[in-house]
Amino acid sequence: MADLDDIRDGKEYGLGIEQKNEKYFLKGSANLNWGMKDRLSRIFNPKTGNSVMLAFDHGFLMGPTSGLERIDLTITPLMKYADCLMCARGVLTALVPTTLRKPVCLRSDAGSTILTEMNHNVVMDVKNAVALNASAMAVMVGIGDPTCEAETVANLYRTVDAAQPYGIPVMGVTAVGKDMVRDARYFGLAARVCAENGANIVKTYYTEGFEKVVACCPVPIVIAGGKKLPELEALELAYKAIQSGAAGVDMGRNVFQSDAPAAIIQAIGAVVHKGMKPAEALQMFNDLKK
């Protein structure tokens, strides 16, 4: 109970000064609730509007792929350099330090592996994501795949329905469809479908004409790194994506399969947050590597 013996009248009301209202920094997110904005501002740096996400969720369908055999040895030392971690719940609870205080984009669907038909997945109960303190939930969407397009779009839609009351953003992860050309038209369609069905973030692939993909998507896009590239090519990929309007990268193999993972993730960070050009970032990589 307040001390009733020393109640003082307020004096500084700032009369004549208009209240400052936050103009939210992230594309398509101004009308979200406070919890959504808070979580998104953990994933994306409010100063730059961008994010370096470290993806190591590959094991949920690939098993111990190269670079992920021992996450405690290969990935844990890199986590401090990332803005956000993307992983599955088993690895999160077993191997991500609880004292790290990094936001987590939680892989929230599963049900198939590389040994079978992909993307016939079910989604996690949102209460499990809440219990794990996830900053976002990630769900794969197989646009263009006639065997799983409808069910994966429905998975995304249901996940958004479940996550919104808890203030958890959802990331739609576009799988590469079998029957469509992998160009700006395809990725523009896939990104837009994810956003139209409620995704707050879209993860997709860079392609020529990527500025059109970004322009037609009303929410932030982060690009996937895809297969391992030479370091200069990975830095060029990140640079071109950011220059085309992407809000960050979600890279895995181009980081943990590098011969100097800590150096490359820091160089990627300089490209994403400082606009460093690829040649300069490669020099930074080589200096850090030494």
Image (cartoon, grey):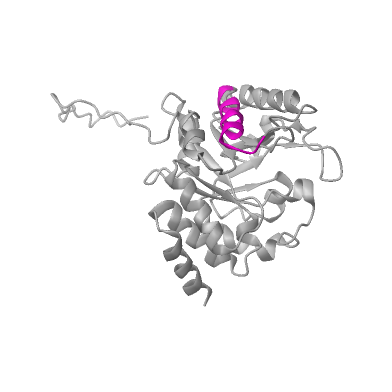
Residue 189: quarter of image = top right
Residue 245: quarter of image = top left
**Total marks in image:** 0
What is the x, y in percent for residue 84? 54, 48
Identified at 80% across, 32% down, the residue is: 120
**Magenta stretch encompasses residue 192:** yes
Q: Is residue 151 left or right of residue 206?
A: right
Residue 111 appears in the rendering: yes
What is the x, y in percent for residue 58? 72, 49
Q: As rendered, which of 111 and 233 lies closer to the eye?
A: 233
Q: Is residue 86 above or below residue 148?
A: below
Identified at 71% across, 51% down, the residue is: 91
| Residue farthest along the left direction in this orientation | 16
Residue 75 appears in the rendering: no
**Magenta stretch encompasses residue 113:** no
| Residue farthest along the bottom direction in this orientation | 290
What segment carries the magenta color? 181-196
Identified at 65% across, 58% down, the residue is: 228
